[in-house]
Image (spheres, helix red, strand yellow):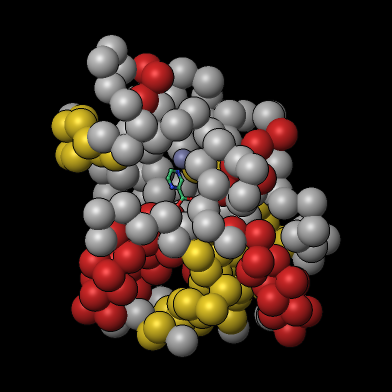
Amino acid sequence: MSALIVIDVQNDFCPGGALAVPEGDKIVPGINALMAEAGSVVLTQDWHPADHSSFASQHDGQEPYGLIEMPYGPQVLWPDHCVIGSEGSAFHRDLTTDRAEMVIRKGFRRAIDSYSAFFENDHETPTGLEGYLRTRGITTLTLVGLATDFCVAYSAIDAAKLGFDVTVRMDLCRAINLNGSLEAAKQDMAQAGVTLA
Ligand code: VGL
Ligand code: ZN
């Protein structure tokens, strides 16, 4: 059994949003088309409290896109984005959400970020998605969405490590590309056994 995992296709990651990914909206029609053929569809939603610790605004003297050390490791600081219930946290208006059987929200704990749909950024706190997929007998995953080099890559690598058969449709993803993060993410995904299509 297979599932399509659509990562964070939300207003704040699209042009005009708080953490806009270039061309983030361009992938929406292709994702909708792929959903029509998918076995199961899971959507993820970045979902932060207004005082989330990944926001540069919460750290004196820090600017967005800086790097700090958190108890769980290095963390990039972001502009405030995907605040719970805000317009920016909503799915892009053209994304088909009707076929989603599961919506998984992540990053809702103030003290820890969660790029991956499977584990928070400490790499050990589970989101529950693994159990959901396994109990449904789903072993094959296709990932699409935003951003290639953060939430998509982290999710794909975790999924491959957990033993899922993982393909990332690169044509249906777009990247932030911060200091070479896209190239690094591609290499890390390939090394983890993810198929880049
Ligand atoms: C993401 C940065 C911060 C993503 C989420 O969806 O890739 N990136 N929060
Ligand atoms: Zn976030």
Q: Is residue 129 visible?
A: no
The x and y percentages for residue 129 are 50, 57
Residue at 30% x, 17% y: name it.
59
Horizontal side of 76 relative to 15 (left or right) equals: left
Q: Count the marks: how many?
A: 0
51 versus 164 height, above or below: above
The x and y percentages for residue 74 are 19, 39
Horizontal side of 162 relative to 74 (left or right) equals: right
Q: Nearer the viewer, residue 102 or 49?
A: 49
Q: Is residue 197 visible?
A: yes
Q: Nearer the viewer, residue 94 or 6?
A: 94
**Farthest top residue in view:** 60
Q: Quadrant of the N terminus?
A: bottom right
Horizontal side of 115 relative to 169 (left or right) equals: left
The x and y percentages for residue 139 are 49, 79
25 versus 55 height, above or below: below
21 versus 67 height, above or below: below
Residue at 62% x, 55% y: name it.
9
Q: Quadrant of residue 196?
A: bottom left
Horizontal side of 19 relative to 161 (left or right) equals: right
The x and y percentages for residue 22 are 53, 57
Residue at 32% x, 26% y: name it.
63
Residue at 50% x, 65% y: name it.
174
